[in-house]
Amino acid sequence: MRQYSITLISTLSILLFSCDMSNVREEANDYFQEGNYTAAVASYNRVIKMEPDDNYSIFNRATALENIEEYDAAYDDYTRLISLKWHSLKALMGRARCNFELENYAGAVMDLKLLIENEPDNMVALELRGRAYMKMGKSWNAIHDLDKVLKVDPNNLHALITRGAALARGGLGPAAIKDFDRAISINPNLPVARFNKGMVFFVHEHFSAAIDSFDKAIDLNENYAEAYTRRGMAKMNYKGYSLKDSCDDFKKGAKLNDPLGAEYVSEYCN
């Protein structure tokens, strides 16, 4: 009789544990689907504490952590899944995104290389690798990846702006302008496309056109610090503007925490 009671209690305990874990997992999944990622992470923490091998919950927790910009913790979860060979390609993509956000661009490229070897037509991976290459200063590698993306998706704004920047860095100003103009035609309210276009004009000493592009970038984003500073630099090189005009821009850039703006204020505006 006593042995029967012990067995019954043990069975009930297992059933209660299983029921509790199922409820918490369901709660976590509901939070995740609602986009309440902070609550989802807290619930997935409870699930994983009870069931450390629940890889599905680990993956969802990693995704939720990404969405609340907890990239280090998300990176750890994705790494764990990769080591377990559980949905490795999806986990590689997730870890690559985390590497990119953590500014570990070489790490992102390594993950994406493995992913693209298995999925050569993965345009999302190719775009992210192109952006990572650009951050590393490897312009031609970036162009190679982004050419493939834009052949499939000619209106991809991220790819257009990044390829334009890579082309500009490679000395191909007219081609860069073409990419920025296409991005602007798709979305006229992109200050970064206006700014990048202005930088191409500035480098090629078309100062009036540069000022016009910086004006438009600032119209779209009145807190665009770098645009104020570069507009001031263009004004210094173009007739019709005084040193005061340039200094007004440098001071605005410096006030918005652009280090170059602060340097120009110190050198020219005291």
Image (tube, grey):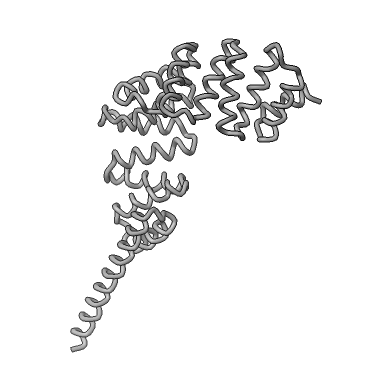
Percent across and percent down for residue 152 are 29, 24
Percent across and percent down for residue 109 are 39, 29
How many numbered discs, if any? 0
| Residue located 70% across and 26% down the image | 250
State which quarter of the image contains the C terminus.
top right
State which quarter of the image contains the N terminus.
bottom left
Query: In terms of depth relative to the viewer, which is nearer, 176 or 170?
Result: 176
Look at the picture and state if 239 lies above or below 221: above
Percent across and percent down for residue 2 are 21, 87
Which residue is most to the right?
270
Look at the picture and state if 269 lies above or below 100: above
Query: In terms of depth relative to the viewer, which is nearer, 167 or 180?
Result: 180
Indicate the quadrant where residue 75 lies: top left
Indicate the quadrant where residue 12 lies: bottom left
For residue 34, side relative to residue 136 (left or right): left
For residue 205, side relative to residue 11 (left or right): right
| Residue located 49% across and 11% down the image | 171
| Residue located 60% across and 24% down the image | 215
Look at the picture and state if 122 lies above or below 241: below
| Residue located 27% across and 74% down the image | 16
Percent across and percent down for residue 234 are 65, 17
